[in-house]
Structures are given as structure tokens and as C-alpha cells.
Image (cartoon, grey):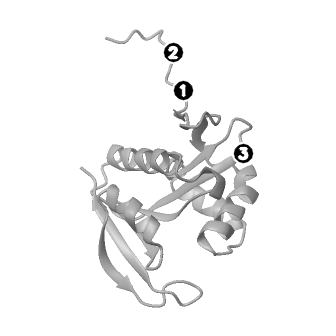
Amino acid sequence: MRCIADTAPGPAFVRFPDDLPPVALRGFRPTDVPFVAAIVADALHEHYDPSLYQSLSTEWPDGFLVAADPRDVPVGFLLGVSQVEREGRILMFAVDRAHRTRGVGTLLMSHFIDRCRARGFRRVTLEVRVSNATAIRFYTRFSYSVTDLLRAYYSDGENGYQMARDVL
């Protein structure tokens, strides 16, 4: 039994195996835009108008998760929306190169799926470049599977896969 005077749970933290500082999970803030845009440019090879992040964050604020270092600098993010009834969609998901393979992506994905489940969503979808074998393996570990080939989906003409998973 929980006493109503108990301290509310704080942000989720992940300690990296090689004793790097912990990363806190929090919501998106407008001051995150330059950091998120830099991660997108490096990891996703795309460039978007900075106002896009702020406008997308208003649709479902709890769907825009940011992993921040101890200085509160974003080192990864997951931007999810709900455009179809009872379905979440990951529009963008990336981790800064220096923080990859350290659990940041797993933390972001796990929390996003939990938030989708809490909203009663039945399914989550995403798109990924066909050449991004590392991301495809990562998504497969979270029970995503390829549902469609998207021809010339990316701005450089590369094909993409649509992937989906059930949320139970």
C-alpha cells in the first residue's frame, strides 16, 4: 500500500555501464530545438524547419520524449504523434552518436510504448530507411515487423520500410 505522503516518482534514469553520468527522461521544451535539430541532421540526415518541432509537440506533448544529460542537454529524443485513432506513430527517433549503444534508445522506446499503452492505443508504427540495418535490428527487438515498402520515401530518394507492432 502506498501512503499519500510518499514522494512522487522522479524522472527515469539510466546509468551507463562504463560509468558515464546518468540520463534523465523528460518532456520536450522549446529550448531543446537546436539540440534536437543537430541530432536529426547527424543521425537521420534530414533538415527540418525549426518551428516543426514546436508545432508537433503540441499535438501530443507526452509523445515527445527527450533524454537529457546531467547538464540538461538533450542527447536523444523520440517524437511520437497520434494521427490515426488508437494508433501511435513515431515520426522521429534518434540518439546522439556519442550516446548510442548505452541504453538511451531503449529507455526512450520503452517509455513511449508504455505511454501508448496508457492511452489505450492498439498499435505503433514507424518508418525506417531500408539501408539502416542497425535501426531495423533495434526495432525488431521491440517486436516491430515490416508491413510495407515505401518507395522513394526519403528526401534523397531512398526507400523506407513501414514497421508496426501491437500494443498490448
Please name whichever residue, 87 or 94, is drawn nearer the observer in this view of the structure. Answer: 94
- For marks 3 and 1, the one nearer the N-term is 1
Q: Tell me residue 143's x, y (percent).
A: 29, 58
- How many residues crowd around disc 3 within 10 Å: few (fewer than 14), some, or many (20 or more)? some
Q: Which of marks 3 and 1 is in front?
A: 3
Q: Tell me residue 131's x, y (percent).
A: 47, 79
Please name whichever residue, 52 or 98, is drawn nearer the observer in this view of the structure. Answer: 98
The amino acid beneath tag 1 is Gly
Q: Tell me residue 79's x, y (percent).
A: 53, 58
Question: In the picture provided, is 157 more to the left or to the right than 135?
Answer: right
The residues tagged by marks 2 and 1 sit, at their Cα atoms, a distance apart of 8 Å
Count of marks overlaid on the render: 3
**Circle on res. 7:** 2
Residue tagged 3: 73
Question: In the picture provided, is 12 more to the left or to the right than 28?
Answer: left
Q: Which of marks 3 and 2 is in front?
A: 3
**Circle on res. 10:** 1
> Is the C-beta separation of discs 2 and 1 under 8 Å?
yes
Q: Tell me residue 42's x, y (percent).
A: 67, 68
Could you say whether the residue bearing mark 2 is in a helix, strand or loop? Answer: loop
- For marks 3 and 2, the one nearer the N-term is 2
> Is the C-beta separation of discs 3 and 2 under 8 Å?
no
